[in-house]
Structures are given as structure tokens and as C-alpha cells.
């Protein structure tokens, strides 16, 4: 636990309060919400206090004497409405390591000399003010490592402002009004590693601002107004590992856009207006591992766009509009393990469209407009373990579609228009553990329906309109642990209940019900009939079960049922109860 002390000069030192912050809490978040913390009186020596929160609403407290009683402060958090932080205010705080000024809309300036002789100061965070920046105001902190000036309505960074803090490693300037970067504005920051310029108003990019910034690894310029990248925009930042360009107005990526970034590992260009990507755009960033292109306007990928990206492991292109994935589109993605292509209006998959995706294990094609899965659609994706095809319009699946997915474990085909359970040429999809076929048009299950899924643990057939489940429908599914089924009518539901001996086995509430041999491993069954009844059955590994049938007669679904329907359901309930 770390102790912080709250001091209000108006109340005097005798009313100093203490709060405790645990090691797993973010100190900065806690300091912004201290009013809700439980505090207690200060029992120790004031001179020994190291972490101080100063609360003041009076300009008369803005002088060095306010801090007179404290001599060993290491962390200082100011909550005040002062317009200026004056020269000499912190004199005597030679051990100060961190300074935080939050939510002071009155603060306009920091006088030269405010940071005088603060050689131990490592972090400064001044946020939610209206700072006017001037060269020299940061002088006195030669060992500063982290500077956060976010949310200060800053419109321009003056050249020379940062030369007095040459050891800065992390600089945060997010949520300001910066429209441009002056040449050499970051000059003299050879150790800068992290730079955050997100949520500003940058309309262009000035590479000359980064003279001698040789160690920058992470650059965030998301949510600005950048419309284009000039050739070799980042040529001076050859150490860059991550680049975030999300939320700008980029319409295209040219072939020279990323020249000079040989070490780039993570590139994010989500939420732009990309329509076109040049064939050679990514040629200079061959070490890339993560590529994000979500929510753009890309309608087609050229055949060679990704041809040199063999080290990419994670690629998402969700929420674009690419109706057709053609042969060799992703041929260069030999190292991709995760590929997400959701909500892209994809209507057609070419046979062998996934040529080159030899390493993909997680493929998401959900929320598209696919109506048919062609033969060998996943022939090259032999490492595939998870396939998501939910929320399409799939009516048919070729029997050869899944012939080569020998490692597939999770298959989601929910919310489509399937009328039967898909299979493959060999009736062998025994690697599949979970199969989701909810919200389809399946009306019957016969002994061959699920024969390919001999290793199945979990099966979801809810929200179909099943009329018939034949007695041996689950004959091959001895490993089934969880089953959800929806029936198309009351008769179908009660018929299946009777065929599994669930009704006859229950002679009184809570009695054990013995499942048939083919369902002996079930731990849970959930089924309903037309929304009128819902059966939730908990089973144990000894093949006995406790069954609960819930009478939903109060629901709206009953308004469309006849008296005979209701009588049948109530008769089933009576079997369970009596």
C-alpha cells in the first residue's frame, strides 16, 4: 500500500487526511477520483510525507510558503484553480520525482524557473488546462523521462520547447488542437521512444520535424485529419516498430508511403477512407506482424498487394466492401495465424481463394453475404482450428468444402439458411468439438445427419424448426456433453421427450432420469417447443439427470396457440411433476 496525504491550506496542517492506494491500482486514476476514497487523519510527522495532494481554490495559496511544512515530497498532485505556476513555487522540493496537475481550466502559463533544480523529476503530467507553451518553461528537468501535456487546447508546439528535456522517453500530446508540426520541433530528443499525437487536427505530416529522433519505437497519430502520406513520409524514423494511423482521411496508400521503416512490426490504418492500396505499398515493411485495415472503403485487393508479407501473423479487414475474394488474394500471407474478414459484403469465395494461408488457425468470415460454400474453399488452410461463418446467407455447402480441414475444432454456421447439417466427402469431421447451427432452417435429424461429427462435445441447434429427431440421430456422438435444440411444434417436442425416456423416468420432482446410451455423456440439455416451454436438464457423469421443465404459459407465445396445444404442453409438465 502507498500512502497519499490530502492537504488544504484553508483547513491547515492539523486537518491533513490520508488515503491508501494498493499496488494493483493505477495511481493516476485514483488521484483523479480521490473524493470517493475513504480517508483518515494523519498520525505521522508532516515532515516525513512523501506523497502530497494539494487542494486549493484560492490564488493566495500560490506561493512557496504554502509548501513550507513539507520537505521530503517525492510525488505532488495539484488540484487548484491557479492561472500561473510561478517561479520558485517548488523551491526546496529537491527530491521531487513526479508532478501531476489535472483539470485546472484556469491554468494558462508556467513561468521560467518553476522547474528550477528539479534534477530528480522523472514524470510531469499537466492535463485539462489551457496552456500557452513557450521555450524555456521546461528548463530545470534534465532527467525527465515522461511528459504528458494532453488535453490542454495546445495549438502549436514552439521550436525549442523540448530541448531542455533531452532525456524524455515518452511524450504525450493527445487531445489538443495541433494543426501542424514545425521543422525540428522534436530536435534534441535522441532518447524519445513513445510519441502520442492522437486526437489533434494535423492535416499533413512533416518528416522534417523529426531530425535526430533516432530511437522512436511507437508513434500514434490516430484521429487527426491527415489526407495523404507523401513519399517516404517516415524515412527519418527507421527504428519505428508500431505506427497507428487510425481515424484519419487517407484515401490511398502509395508505393512509397512506408519507405524507411525496415523494423515496423505493427501497422494500423483502421477507420480511414481507403479505396485503393498500391501493389507495392507494403514492399518496404517486410517484418510486419500485425496489419489492421478495418472500416475503410476497399472494394478490391490486387493480386500482389500482400505478396511480401510472409511474416504477418494477424490481419483484420473488417467492415470494408469487397464482394469477391479472388484466387491468390492472400497468397503472400504464409505466416498469418489470425485472419478476420467480417462485415465486408463478401458474396463469393473463389475455389482456392485462400491460397497461401498455410498457417491460419483462426478465420472469421461472419456477417457477410455468402450464399454457398464452394468445393475446397479451405483447401490451403490445413492448420485451421476455428472457423466463423455466422450471420451469412448460406443455403448450401458443397460436400467437398471441408475435405481438407483435418484440424478444425470450432465451427460456427449459426444464423444462416441451412436446411441440413453440412458434412464432407468422407463423413469425417471428427476433430470438430463445437458446432453451432442455431438460427437456421433445419427441420429433421436422422442417423446420418451428425455421423461426420464423431468427436463433438457441444451442439447448438436452437432456434431451428425441427419436426423430427430420429431415435438414432446421435448414435455417433457419444462424446456429446451439451445439446441445445428447438422444435417446430409441441408434438415434436413431446415426442422426442418420450423417445428418450425423460418423461417416463421422472416419477416425482427432482428424480433421476436415465439417458439413453447414445447420450450418456451429456452434462446439459436445453430444448424448447415454439417458445411455449423450455426444458433445462442438468446431467452428471453418472448418466443421471435432474430435469426442470418451465411453464412459459404467461409469455406472448401462448396467444397464438390453441387449447389443444396448451393441453399437450401441460400434460408434459404433469409428467415431470408427478
Image (spheres, rainbow, N blue to C red):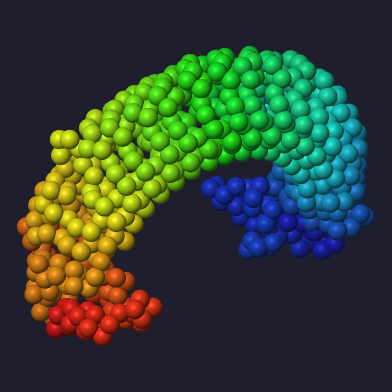
Q: Position of residue 379 (x, y in %)?
A: 29, 27
For the point 16% across and 49% down, which residue is it?
Answer: 449
Q: Nearer the viewer, residue 520 or 228?
A: 228
Q: Considering only vertical position in the picture, is 510 above or below 516?
A: below
Residue drawn at x 78%, y 51% is 103
> Where is residue 68 shown, x and y percent of the image?
84, 48
Name above or below for residue 527 compared with residue 344: below
Residue 338: give x, y in percent of width and height.
41, 33
Q: Where is 144 relative to 191, above or below? A: below
Query: Looking at the image, can residue 527 be seen?
Result: no
For the residue pair 540 and 124, the one nearer the viewer reads as 540
Q: Is residue 15 left or right of residue 348?
A: right
Left or right, residue 213 beside residue 275: right
Which image quadrant for residue 111? top right
Rendered-image quadrant of the C terminus: bottom left
How many discs mark residues in the rendered view? 0
Q: Quadrant of residue 214?
A: top right
Residue at x 66% of width, y 30% of height: 251
User: Going by the image, does 426 lie left or right of 186?
Assistant: left
**Nearest the eye: 292 or 7:** 292
Q: Position of residue 464 (x, y in %)?
A: 29, 60
Q: Is residue 232 visible?
A: yes
Amino acid at each position: 500500500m502507498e500512502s497519499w496525504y490530502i492537504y488544504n491550506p484553508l483547513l491547515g496542517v492539523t486537518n491533513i487526511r490520508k488515503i491508501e492506494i494498493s499496488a494493483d491500482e493505477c495511481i493516476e486514476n485514483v488521484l483523479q477520483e480521490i473524493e470517493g476514497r475513504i480517508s483518515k487523519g494523519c498520525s505521522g510527522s508532516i515532515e516525513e510525507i512523501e506523497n502530497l495532494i494539494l487542494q486549493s481554490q484560492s490564488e493566495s495559496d500560490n506561493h512557496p510558503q504554502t509548501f513550507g511544512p513539507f520537505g521530503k515530497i517525492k510525488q505532488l498532485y495539484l488540484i487548484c484553480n491557479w492561472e500561473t505556476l510561478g517561479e520558485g513555487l517548488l523551491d526546496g522540493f529537491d527530491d521531487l520525482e513526479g508532478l501531476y496537475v489535472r483539470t485546472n481550466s484556469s491554468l494558462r502559463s508556467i513561468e521560467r524557473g518553476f522547474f528550477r533544480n528539479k534534477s530528480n523529476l522523472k514524470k510531469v503530467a499537466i492535463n485539462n488546462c489551457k496552456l500557452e507553451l513557450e521555450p524555456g518553461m521546461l528548463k530545470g528537468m534534465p532527467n525527465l523521462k515522461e511528459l504528458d501535456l494532453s488535453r490542454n487546447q495546445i495549438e502549436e508546439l514552439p521550436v525549442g520547447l523540448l530541448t531542455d528535456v533531452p532525456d524524455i522517453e515518452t511524450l504525450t500530446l493527445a487531445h489538443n488542437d495541433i494543426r501542424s508540426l514545425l521543422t525540428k520541433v522534436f530536435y534534441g530528443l535522441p532518447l524519445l521512444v513513445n510519441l502520442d499525437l492522437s486526437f489533434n487536427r494535423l492535416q499533413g505530416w512533416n518528416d522534417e520535424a523529426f531530425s535526430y529522433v533516432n530511437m522512436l519505437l511507437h508513434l500514434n497519430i490516430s484521429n487527426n485529419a491527415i489526407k495523404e502520406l507523401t513519399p517516404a513520409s517516415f524515412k527519418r524514423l527507421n527504428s519505428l516498430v508500431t505506427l497507428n494511423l487510425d481515424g484519419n482521411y487517407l484515401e490511398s496508400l502509395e508505393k512509397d508511403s512506408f519507405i524507411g521503416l525496415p523494423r515496423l512490426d505493427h501497422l494500423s490504418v483502421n477507420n480511414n477512407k481507403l479505396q485503393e492500396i498500391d501493389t507495392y505499398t507494403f514492399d518496404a515493411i517486410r517484418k510486419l506482424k500485425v496489419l489492421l485495415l478495418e472500416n475503410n472503403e476497399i472494394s478490391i485487393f490486387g493480386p500482389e498487394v500482400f505478396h511480401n508479407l510472409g511474416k504477418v501473423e494477424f490481419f483484420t479487414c473488417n467492415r470494408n466492401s469487397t464482394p469477391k475474394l479472388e484466387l491468390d488474394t492472400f497468397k503472400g500471407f504464409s505466416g498469418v495465424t489470425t485472419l478476420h474478414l467480417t462485415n465486408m459484403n463478401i458474396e463469393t469465395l473463389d475455389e482456392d481463394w485462400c491460397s497461401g494461408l498455410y498457417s491460419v488457425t483462426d478465420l472469421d468470415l461472419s456477417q457477410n453475404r455468402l450464399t454457398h460454400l464452394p468445393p475446397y474453399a479451405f483447401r490451403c488452410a490445413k492448420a485451421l482450428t476455428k472457423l466463423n461463418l455466422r450471420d451469412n446467407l448460406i443455403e448450401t455447402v458443397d460436400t467437398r468444402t471441408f475435405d481438407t480441414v483435418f484440424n478444425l475444432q470450432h465451427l460456427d454456421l449459426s444464423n444462416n439458411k441451412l436446411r441440413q447439417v453440412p458434412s464432407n466427402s468422407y463423413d469425417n469431421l471428427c476433430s470438430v468439438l463445437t458446432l453451432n447451427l442455431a438460427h437456421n432452417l433445419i427441420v429433421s435429424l436422422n442417423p446420418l445427419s451428425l455421423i461426420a461429427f464423431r468427436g463433438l462435445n457441444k451442439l447448438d441447434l436452437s432456434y431451428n424448426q425441427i419436426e423430427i429427431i430420429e431415435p438414432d440421430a446421435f448414435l455417433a456422438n457419444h462424446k456429446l456433453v451439451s445439446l441445445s435444440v428447438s422444435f417446430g411444434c409441441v408434438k415434436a417436442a413431446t415426442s422426442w421427450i418420450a423417445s428418450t425416456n425423460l418423461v417416463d423416468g421422472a416419477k416425482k420432482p427432482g428424480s433421476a432420469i436415465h439417458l439413453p446410451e447414445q447420450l450418456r455423456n451429456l452434462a446439459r440439455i436445453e430444448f424448447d417447443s415454439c417458445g411455449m416451454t423450455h426444458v433445462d436438464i442438468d446431467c452428471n457423469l453418472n448418466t443421471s439427470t435432474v430435469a426442470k421443465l418451465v411453464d412459459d404459459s404467461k409469455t406472448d407465445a401462448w396467444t397464438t396457440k390453441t387449447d389443444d396445444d396448451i393441453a399437450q404442453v401441460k400434460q408434459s409438465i404433469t409428467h415431470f411433476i408427478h
